[in-house]
Structures are given as C-alpha cells and as structure tokens.
Image: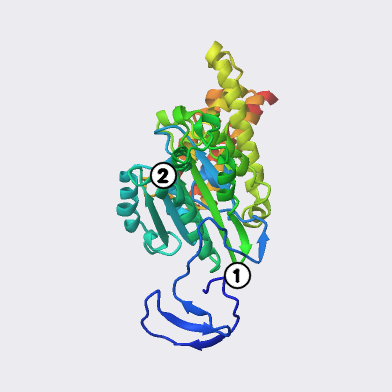
Amino acid sequence: MISPLLRGRTLKTFKGSGDYTVDDVIGTTEFDEEIQLAQYWPVRKPRPYAQKLGVTEPLITGQRVIDVFFPLSKGGTAAIPGGFGTGKTMTQHAVAKWCDADLIVYIGCGERGNEMTEVLTEFPELIDPRTGRSIMERTILIANTSNMPVAAREVSLYSGITLAEYFRDMGMHVAIMADSTSRWAEALRELSGRMEEMPAEEGFPAYLPTRLASFYERAGRVISLEGQEGSVSVIGAVSPPGGDFSEPVTQHTKRFIRCFWALDRELANARHYPAIGWIDSYSEYADEVRDWWEVHNPLWGTLRLEALNLLKNENRLQQIVRLIGPDALPDSERLVLRVAEMIKNGFLQQNAFDDVDKYCSIEKQIAILELMMSYYKRALACIKAGAPLMNVSNLPACDEIVRIKMVYKNEEMDKILEVGSRLDVQLSEVERAFSVNRAQ
C-alpha cells in the first residue's frame, strides 16, 4: 500500500526486503516521490476510491435477532440507541466478537474506562469461529475514555473511520463499533461552547447533523483504487439521556442510517438480551440482502415476515389481555401468545456467556425459526379442527424447540432435525385424533 496522494505509478528505486522503521524511505517513484511504510492522512477527509458498489451481502453476526429480523449489510450503517443499562455495549461486543468482518475497529469514545479494560482483557482469550485464532488479532482499539481531553474525544470517530478506510483499500471488510456517538456529540458541544459559537437544539451546535452525516456517509462497499473490493460497516451506539429517542443526536442519526436496533428498557429489565425491541426496530437492508439469502437459504424471507407479523399480532393481543385477561381470547389467539413466547425465549433471547448459544450459525438460525413457524401453522390447523389449545401446547417437543439454542451446537444439525421429526409425530397424533372425532 502506498498513499493515494502519490502521482507516480512506477518504482524508480526499491530497497528490497529488510528491517525498516515506518519512517524509513524504502523506494522512490519516477517523480522522485519518497515511499515510506507509514501514510499520513487528514482524518476528517475521506480516502478516495474508484467505484461505490451496492450493499447486497449481509454482515453475519451470529446474533439471531440481527441476522434474521434486522440484517445489516457489509458497507451499511446501523445505530443502537438505548438508555443506561439496556445493553448497547454488550450488543456491540457480541457483534464485534462474532461478525464475519476481516477487521474490527472499536472506538471507545467518552465511555467508562472499565469497558475498554474489559475488551482488552476478554478479546485476547476469545477464538474466532472462522479462523480458529484469537479475535484480538483482527481488532483495533481506539481508547478515548470519559476522562481524556475533550478534543481527543471529538476526533476519535474520524481516527477510527480513517483507519477502517486504510484497511478497506487493502481489500478488507471492516466493521466499526462507535461507542458512543452521543459522548462524541457532547464533546462537540463542549468545543463549540468554548469557541463561543451560537448553540442550537439542546445546546448542540447547528452543524451537528452535518458532522454526523460526514461520519456515517464514509461507510460503504467500494472498489479501491487498486481494484480490490472492500467495505466499511458502521455500528454506532447512541445514549439518549433518560432513553428519550426524540433528543437531537438520536433523531439526526436516524436520518443517516438505514438499520435501527432500538433497545427496549422492559426487555433489559427482564434480562432479555440482546434487548433489541422488535416493534420499534427496522432494517432497510432486508430487500437488498434478499438475493444473497435466496442462494444460501431461500426460507429466510418467508420465515422473517411470518415471524414479525406474528410478533406484531401478539403485541396487539397483549393490550387486550391487560384489560380482560387471556381466558377471554379464543384458542387460536391464545396460540399466537404461546408461539410468540416460544420465539422470544427460544429464538430472540441469546446468552452471550453460554458456550453453545453465544454464536449461532445461519443454518441453525433458520432451522429453529422454521420449526417454530411450522408448529404454529399445524397447531392452528388442529385448533380449527376442534382440538383444545391444551392438546397442542403441552407437547413435549415444544419445550425441546425452545431449548435447541443452548443444547445443540451449530454442527449438530442432524439432532435439530430429530427434534422436528418428534414434533411431526406428536402433531400427527393430535391431527389423527380430531380428524377421527370429526368423521364420527
């Protein structure tokens, strides 16, 4: 890699292999420009590229709620807003540990020092499931904690994304974890106040949206000047005071990102992690990654829509249940509540500290959700045929489905299929029993 600022295209001199420092001159171009092993680049200026490509390949994270429900593309942008204690840092750590990016740039901007210490002590001990080597080998940490100078905090985001672009130009797929952009915006507000600039909304400078845009717009999937394909994906945590998503940083961030993982306080209090709420969250990349999923698992699109619609229906029914109780609902709607609970506990909830559940392959993700939706459709048919809810909700295989995530490893797909076979046998017995009753 040489600096894109050099005009030369051929080597005039080259020293060859040997031991050099980053400041040693190792060669010159035909214009007598010196080539060193270090590049100097203004961090606020985007690095050039030859062509920008569409974001059609998902960033596989191993987190079921993200990969299936709210996918992020390689080269895409996402925000994780949430109040104190809702799991922003935990979610970013999980994505950083297990996503299929070639390199992780973790920016600790204005956060607590113990969070950076946790990354420094924990990551070297973790093994990348794709390479079998330490995750720390592919991680760059930028530490600008809350006790560091405000100017350093303000520039940390640009430092991180410039490093990401440097490796992108080498043909690598890079993921940035910015934790958090709210602390960066507070540093920007403090600098603006010291320069006696006119404050705007909530004291932030009027150019806050422009600065946010200049950061997020540097994400993307590109062809580098060298002709290699690389990408920079940006995942920014937002810490709105009191969990208020209407505050300026969250609102302006939503203008420039296409994937919104809204953390829910009630889920976090219930120890449901990742606490990504399925009602307020969204991903605009779902249509763009559909073709990739059609090749790898065609069931993804159908299962995703069916499960999301069922969860939205369950949310509507819960409002009725709070008023009159579940017993007033017909069995078909109580089945919706039952299956939604299975999806929440057996699919959406994921234990980052469990050796089996911390990373879930896409094959296992689809297999679990397919079992749950298949159960729902056949159980609903049984209820319409006259079977009581108790007969279809108390099947032993139902509990097995919920436990699949923690019992069977990613490579044990044959055992997951055996659970499906047992479920098929148990549902078939219910179907036969009530088809006979109807015939009589």
Q: Could you tell whether 237 is left or right of 374 in the image?
A: left
User: x, y percentage for residue 437?
Assistant: 64, 24
What type is the residue that disc 1 sits on?
A: Gln
Q: Looking at the figure, which quarter contains the C terminus?
A: top right
For mark 1, does the 10 Å Cα neighbourhood hold few (<14), some (14 to 19), or many (20 or more) residues?
some
Q: Which mark is residue 228?
A: 1
For mark 2, does the 10 Å Cα neighbourhood hold few (<14), some (14 to 19), or many (20 or more) residues?
some
Secondary element at image label 2: helix
Q: Nearer the viewer, residue 196 or 271?
A: 196
Q: Nearer the viewer, residue 224 or 7?
A: 7
Give the answer, above or below, for where 361 lies relative to 266: below
Closer to the eye: label 2 or 1: 1
Cα gap from disc 2 to disc 1, whole angstroms: 40 Å
User: x, y percentage for residue 233?
Assistant: 55, 53
Secondary element at image label 1: loop
Report whether residue 217 is seen. Answer: yes
- Taking the view exactly as shown, the residue that stands out farthest to the front is 196
User: x, y percentage for residue 90?
Assistant: 41, 43
User: x, y percentage for residue 423?
Assistant: 53, 39
Which residue occupies 38% across, 85% down? 18
Query: Which badge, 2 or 1, is on the more N-terminal residue?
Result: 1
Q: Which mark is residue 426?
A: none
Give the answer, above or below, for where 277 lies relative to 127: above
Which residue occupies 62% across, 70% down? 225
Q: Nearer the viewer, residue 363 or 250?
A: 250
Q: Which residue is mark 2?
A: 406
What type is the residue that disc 2 sits on?
A: Met
